Amino acid sequence: MRRGTRHPCVVGTDERVAGKGGALAAELRSALAGDVDFGTSARALATMDASNYRRVPAGTVAPRDADDVAAALEVCRRHGVPVVPRGAGTSIGGQATGTGVVLDLTRHMNGLVSVDPEARTAVVAPGLVLGRLREAVRPYGLTFGPDPSTHSRCTLGGMIGNNACGAHSVAWGTTADNVRSLDVVTHRGDRLTLGTGGQGAPPGLLDLVGRHLALLRTGYPAGLPRRISGYALDALLPERGTDVVRSFVGSEGTLGVVTEATVRLVPLPAEPVLVVLGYADETAAADAAAGLLPYGPLTVEGMAADLVGPAAAGLPRGGAWLFCEVDGAGAARDLVRAADALDAAVVRDPAGQRTLWRIREDAAGTATRLPGGGEAWPGWEDCAVPPARLGAYLREFRALLAEYGLRGTPYGHFGDGCVHVRVDFDLWTGKGVRDFRRFSEAVADLVVAHGGSLSGEHGDGQARAELLPRMYGEELVALFGAVKDVWDPDGGMNPGMLVRPRPLDEGLRFEGLPLVGVGREAARCVGVAKCRVAGPSTGDAVMCPSFRATGEEKHSTRGRARLLHEMALGEVITDGWRSEEVREALDLCLSCKGCRSDCPVGVDMAAYKAEFLDRHYAGPVGRWRRPRSHWTMGGLPHWLDLFGRAVNLATRLPFAARLAGVTPTRPLPRVAARTLTAWFADRASSRPSALTLWPDTFTDHLAPEVGTAAVRVLEEAGLGVSLPPGRVCCGLTYVSTGRLGAARRVMRRTLDVMERETRPVVVLEPSCAATLRTDLPELLPDDPRAARLAASVLTFAQALETLAPDWTPPRIDRPVAGQTHCHQHAVLGDAAERRLRERAGLAGDLAGGCCGLAGNFGFEPGHEAVSLACAEDQLLPALRTAPDTAEILADGFSCRTQVAHLTGGRARHLAEVLAEGLDGPR
């Protein structure tokens, strides 16, 4: 059969599948206990994975168990509709997309069934996240060996489908090396338990293999630890144990659906030590990698300076590095002696190791942003060559990039000869797509010339399956098709992937997308799904609080980006800016800006939300449809300037909350008797001004005690303080409620006031400082005053550190608890705050995450549960475990308000604590 043609048994084009939606959904609902969703949002959320491809499904099914899987397959088979099993949707070859029914195996089939520490095995459901498995078996001193950089969200089923590997494969192999048995349901409903010795083989498979033994013995490249491409049919050879499990792993959902797996566990290293070796350049590191393997490293990961960027400051001298984990200090010394590196760092501290590993784990996203701001994409993501040939391959690969006028940043599993790279393909134009095809074909030939595999980790999918004959030859690829037909005679399991593939340049997700606007911005999301990490966040991470609260894809940064992408395309979501599906997904976005810093590609959902709300409620009709809270909470600076303390009287009126469009379950903030600006105007100071203190709305009207404390501390540090010569506002509340026209007017008036200001501007409220730093210049890009003001903004701690470096703060000598404001984390950074606390004897770290109040968000009806869940992520647990003597710190007004509402306690701004300390110990 000609490559790229549809299997004769696959009934229905994409149009026929779409036409079956209503009847198919109804029959699935009657047959299953699980969730069936053929709605617009569900379909839009499943159109893409982490690849360049897009296919629109008929709907999604979240089965509860193996019986549901079998029932879903039976219904879909009767209707002639294909099925695509899907885990976390982080596949890079397009294999997690499809036109039929997508099986979401993460919602219900996500449990750890059992652990046998003595046998070192675990039984897992396919939707179990790898990170959860590793956490569960860690108390036994065990782990699952394969560990992709997406370990915090990838699923065991997805790993089995792609034969995932990760950094430790030089020690523990691929997923295929670590699976003992599989329970599988085929498209025709057969339930098989796969094992060795031919166990579980469908009828006809072993006979087919027996007729092609010579081909299987000679058709696969040797000496290649990362051969992931195609079906591993050589595992079925008698001399290899007729291993049906190994032959199934890596089949990308084209043969059947895994419903349960027994996996091998391995001992954790007793004393993990990270050795980072510096080399002159990437090819020098690649040349050295294979020579380190005899010393038994657990990892040999490579990356160069053009990917690491500013983070290279913490790495040893060199232009490229190998990250080598070993077990024990002695092994580390042996490796350093053998390495012949320019420089080396030996890191024993677990925190230091995590910091360095984070650089490597984020590479899948950071590689999509080239120096200078260009965009790079998957497409030639993870080929592998024999490790001894890696240096030579990379030299020729770089030359090929130059020949085609392309740029990319290789990195990856150098010890296994596996290279990841994102390339700045032009996938928006016809010429660019043609060049993408020509380059892919040329690199495929280069890989094969080096005895390599087109896929070394992530599978072939649509991206590389068309090129498999270049690697294996027509005869072996034809055998792949014959094996597919034995397992799946109807061709219903993930058609168009791996076998009889769709062309590699068909169905690209950029086709038809506008070149500018929020759709283009949303396309920055490459689907690596770092925002989909469930459970409590760790460290100072913020993204994505709403997903951790709900566990729903549409409330993740990726999910919202996908919906905006589909809105811009107009095929699935057809009502554009009026879309209720997009509005509903964005409604639970807290605008925490966590994705701006935590997302490896810098997706800025807060900015996208603001633009969407602005357009969604545009026009006379739209203005009347706006929630009242957008006018009341969103216009807070105006109302407080206009009415001042009279607002307190208004909030006491019956039905005040309802009239204001806010929840009655929270008390509204009280307006202070005297504003900060009034207090400042009545005081006299002869000290020359060194800075301007920004009287933000929250500090001025609601918490002037923070401002008076800050003035006292700054003056004690020898810094004269002035206030702006007129009323200023950063526009935060207008931005967060999507009233961008009003925000720009407010910002322009502020720039008029600040036009002649040349001194540093100290902003006490982190959210206002972040707005001035980012939203102001982004909303007024053509006004040079905006960029100047943004560049002058300092936080309280930054001002003390830079303007009064010799000042010694008072010693407080108390432990601290509380929260770093999410905008501080995302935009401003808190390094200066940490150093100031340390100098003042305020010991300990503040919680990360988002407090959950997030300005107007926590006051809006319907947000109460999510607001509380966000607080329970990090803030409230930190407060519960804090000692009685702890100082509760929160520089953000929202954070302090959330603490007061949920605990009855009082959190304070760092300025208040230091001002109190000037008077001596309490």
Image (spheres, helix red, strand yellow):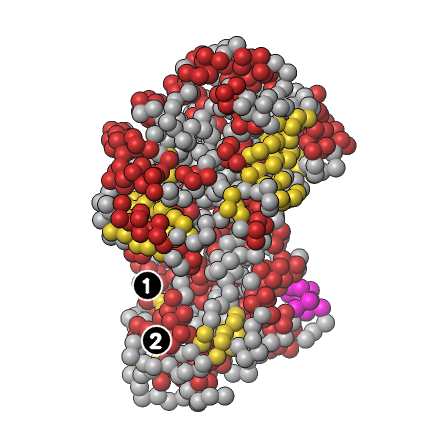
Q: Nearer the viewer, mark 2 or mark 1?
A: 2
Q: Residue furthest right?
A: 30
Question: What separation in Å lies between label 2 and label 1 (alpha carbons)?
Answer: 17 Å
Tell me if residue 660 is in the magenta stretch: yes
Q: Nearer the viewer, residue 650 or 512?
A: 512
Q: Is residue 679 left or right of residue 384?
A: right
**Residue to which mark 1 is pinned:** 791
**Residue to which mark 2 is pinned:** 800
Tell me if residue 812 is in the magenta stretch: no
* Mark 2–mark 1 CB contact (< 8 Å): no
Residue type at numbered disc 2: Leu
Instruction: Pinpoint residue 226: horizontal percent, then vertical percent.
Output: 41, 31
**Badge number at residue 205:** none
Question: From what the image shows, is residue 134 above or below residue 900?
Answer: above
Question: From what the image shows, is residue 358 above or below residue 102?
Answer: below
Residue type at numbered disc 1: Ala
Q: Which residue is at 66% across, 43% downward?
A: 113
Q: Nearer the viewer, residue 858 or 135?
A: 135
Instruction: Pinpoint residue 276: horizontal percent, then vertical percent.
Output: 32, 50
Secondary element type, mark 2: helix
Where, by quadrant of the figure, is residue 228 drawn? top left
Where, by quadrant of the figure, is residue 34 drawn? top right
Q: Is residue 362 left or right of residue 494?
A: left
Q: Which residue is at 60% across, 45% downward?
A: 118
Question: From what the image shows, is residue 601 above or below residue 858?
Answer: above
Question: From what the image shows, is residue 507 above or below residue 870?
Answer: above
Magenta stretch in the rendered image: 655-666
Q: Mark 1 or mark 2, which is nearer the start of the sequence?
A: 1
